[in-house]
Every structure is written in C-alpha cells, then in structure tokens.
Amino acid sequence: MKSKGKGIQIANEIAEEMMSETLYGDNLRLQQVTADFLLIAVNYAPTGAQLMVSTNLTKHHLRNSLHLVHLEFRTTYVGGGIPESLLNEMFGNDYEDATEEGFSLFISRKLVKMMNGDVRYVREADKSSFIITLDFAAAHNLTT
C-alpha cells in the first residue's frame, strides 16, 4: 500500500452513531469515491505525515420511521495540498488536458453529485482537506 511506502499513518474518527445506522444508497460508489480522494491525499501528503479521516452525521426526522441523514466525510492531511492545476481538473475547469489523477477526481466528484452530494477542497495554512457531503435515507433505528 502506498501509504506504508511513504510512512503515512491513517487515523480515523468515525462517529459512533454512524456504526449503527442503516443508510440507503449506493455504498459501492461511496466506497469508490472516498477511496479515490484518500489516495490523492496520500499522493500529496509529505512522507511520514498523518492523514485523518473523520465523519459527521446529522439525522433529520421526516415522518414516521423515515429519516434523512446528512453525512460528511473529511480527509485532512498536513502539507501544502494538491496543485492548483489538479483542482482545476477536478472542478472541470481544465477538462480537455486532464491528467489521470485529475480525470479520476473529476469522475469521483461527478459520481458524488449524482448521489446528490458535493465535494469541497479546503486549503489552510498548514493542512488541506477533501470534504464530501451526502444525504441518505435512513430507517428508524430501534436501538437509538
């Protein structure tokens, strides 16, 4: 795995309530896009860095046993972030000459949008984050 070769540690903060939720959506597509954004983060994180994958879940009651769950996946890493040209490719601003990584990010972002979600990229002074937000239907969980 590439993260081991670079000495990168991947830590996670998964919301406890997320582990017991039954969400309805395309879980394979969700795994595909989160893995793609994580791989890009590993590629551009400095050697020996730590990546943090965190989730946040907000549940809204719609009616009877139906809920809407707003889910946020955040992949954060220390470093200067990905190049501006790659961000332009991801957001479709430089689509014709896209690199393999840029095309992959572009497709992943489109897949997230097809699932009624969005992808943001936030660059701060010492860290960068991919933030994926999605809404899913959820059944009433009798254990909560």
Image (spheres, helix red, strand yellow):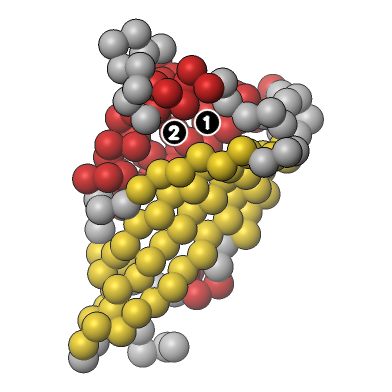
Which label number is shown at residue 36? 2
Numbered disc 1: secondary structure = helix
Type of amino acid under label 2: Asp
Q: Quadrant of residue 95?
A: top left
Give the class, few, some or many, for how many residues have Cα within 10 Å of label 1's Cα (few <14, many ≥20). some
Q: Quadrant of residue 111?
A: top left
Quadrant for the N terminus, please. top right
How far across and down, in percent of the image, does residue 9 sit?
A: 71, 39
For disc 1, the marked residue is: 39
Along the viewing direction, whichever of 103 and 87 lies nearer the viewer: 87
The answer to the question of whether label 1 and label 2 lie on touching residues, with beta carbons closer than 8 A, is yes
Q: Residue at x 49, y 48 (%)?
A: 131
- Give the Cα separation between the discs numbered 1 and 2: 5 Å
Give the class, few, some or many, for how many residues have Cα within 10 Å of label 2's Cα (few <14, many ≥20). some
- Image check: 108 left or right of 115? right
Q: Can residue 26 be seen?
A: no
Q: Residue at x 41, y 44 (%)?
A: 119
Q: Residue at x 59, y 50 (%)?
A: 53
How far across and down, in percent of the image, does residue 8 sit?
A: 71, 33
- Image check: 20 left or right of 74? left
Q: Residue at x 35, y 22 (%)?
A: 93
For residue 135, above or below residue 97: below
Along the viewing direction, whichever of 38 and 83 lies nearer the viewer: 83
For residue 14, above or below residue 44: below
How far across and down, in percent of the image, does residue 21 sit?
A: 39, 73
